[in-house]
Amino acid sequence: MTSRLVLGTGSLAGALVGELSGREGRLSVVSADENAVRTLREEGVAAEVGDPTEEATLRERDRPDTVAVATTDPGTNVAAARAVRQVFPGAFVLAYVGERPTDDEVAAIEVVADEVVDPRAVTAERLLEKVGDDGLRTRKLMSVLRDVDGRLAIVTHDNPDPDAIGSAVALARIADAAGCQSNICYFGDITHQENRAFVNVLEFDLVNLEPDADLSDYDGVALVDHSRPGVNDGLPDDTPVDVVIDHHPPRYPVEARFVDLRSEVGATSTLLVDYFRTLGITPTREVATGLLFGIRVDTDEYTREVNPQDFEASAFLAPHADAGTLDRIESPSMSAETLDTIARAIRNRERHGSGLLSCVGELTDRDALAQAADRLLDLEDVTTTLVYGISDGTIYVSARARGTDLDLGETLRDAFGQIGSAGGHADMAGAQISLGLLDAIDADDESLNEVVRAIVSDRFLDAMGSRSHRVMAGLHADDYHGSGLAGGPRSLEDIAASGLRTDDGETPDGDPFGDDRDIDGESDDEPDR
């Protein structure tokens, strides 16, 4: 059992005792102030009268794991810290420099203590938070939120993952602090079993919007974990946006009254923690648990694109989060549909060097694709996986990579950005492609699966560089200079029927697409978890 010892009384010592008394483990206090000791005893704290600078007094105590030296006198703290180091050499020593210490006293404490609390440094750091970049950013956000006359729609990307949901819930708490009412909204479905458990266990109140939903009841719109309306959400692409907070790198200018795009962090939840800390907001158990789970999922348990800020945010959240709830969320039951999709992905897998591709046919649970891609990545000598299937007239693609310099987000944009939406991270990405008139063919029809397999596999392998590139002519209008096909992304049957030819005049045999011009894709976002 953890044992903690606090030396001294006063405002800082009192705050420490108040915080530590509610935690598991033993807590005791030694102080020369008899009245303070008497008060602590009345409150149920194990306190003794004694000189904290005397080694003999300390030897009477059980060996502590942590010692906090917290009197108000700098000289006493120096002597007490030295005594603690002599008597308990293995203990972690936290030492307060006291009120108005000299430079020599501060230096002496720094020699023996593991961590030093200097109010002058803390005050300077706090002031920098208020007047520095974080403070300025927070003031601008609060100003925009206060300026929303009515209710704010906080919109996640389609089929939101824990990072998007946790970030949205946290932004709603910040909006509340600004006096702005809000609803957390999303398009699509939450089908991944962990994500469903995440929402249900934490009892988050989310509004599932239907396609073409009327948002006239909202006076403001905020986007979290994505940055453009109409791209990976069901909003019209001309929707005015008030707030954007995202960690995905933008490929095009982002328009909003307030924009916070920081791609160096591993999760959008990390950015929301910054606002909590700057505003002095203590997250509730549900909000802290949601944000912590969002960081853990998006960084793949701190192994993918993680930043020191993600660790700092997690350390801030951990004391407020519920570890038992996290365990319940991370161990949900798997549906029979998900298990069947994973089985089909394994059965239909095709090996291409270190890459593994699999078409699972008709989908009942699109989130199962991501789980299948993860499972296939566990196979020996496989560094890249791509799993895809068909649902409601759309091909859904999920890709994973490990131990390779391939950037999956860029690869999927190059492969599918001209005919759909695609994007994501370097080692986790997804895409969506409309079938168009080919949707009239039953999804279980092998002829449709063969067409889809040829299109998706060939384009992905071309983008990976596994095959020779072919330059296509006539794909775009001469006056077109956009980011996708002229007039917007085409469906598969449109392109397949257009008679595209290579520069030598031949239609690609068995491939209705070939390798298109190198024009950036449309999506900045990761369509699936």
Image (spheres, rainbow, N blue to C red):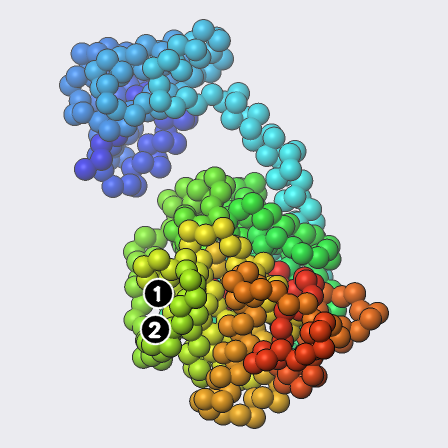
**Residue at 47 percent of width and 74 percent of height:** 388
Task: Point out the image quarter for the N terminus.
Answer: top left
**Quadrant in which residue 336 is drawn:** bottom left
Residue that lies at the very extreme toward the top in this rendered image: 104
Q: Earlier in the sequence, mark 1 or mark 2?
A: 2
Marks 1 and 2, how far apart in space?
9 Å
| Image spot of residue 221 (x, y percent) | 67, 64
| Image spot of residue 239 (x, y percent) | 72, 68
**Quadrant in which residue 115 is drawn:** top left
| Image spot of residue 411 (x, y percent) | 56, 61
Q: Amino acid at mark 1?
A: Arg
Q: Is residue 126 left or right of residue 39?
A: right
Which secondary structure, mark 2? Answer: helix
Circles 1 and 2: CB distance less than 8 Å?
Answer: yes
Residue 327: mark: none
Can the viewer see residue 136? Answer: yes
Q: Amino acid at mark 2?
A: Ile
For mark 2, what is the residue? Answer: 346
Residue that lies at the very extreme toward the right in this rendered image: 479
The answer to which of 250 and 279 lies nearer the viewer is 250
* Dot 2 crowding, Cα within 10 Å, few <14, some 14–19, many 20+: many
For mark 1, what is the residue? Answer: 375
Which secondary structure, mark 1? Answer: helix
Foreground tag (1 vs 2): 2
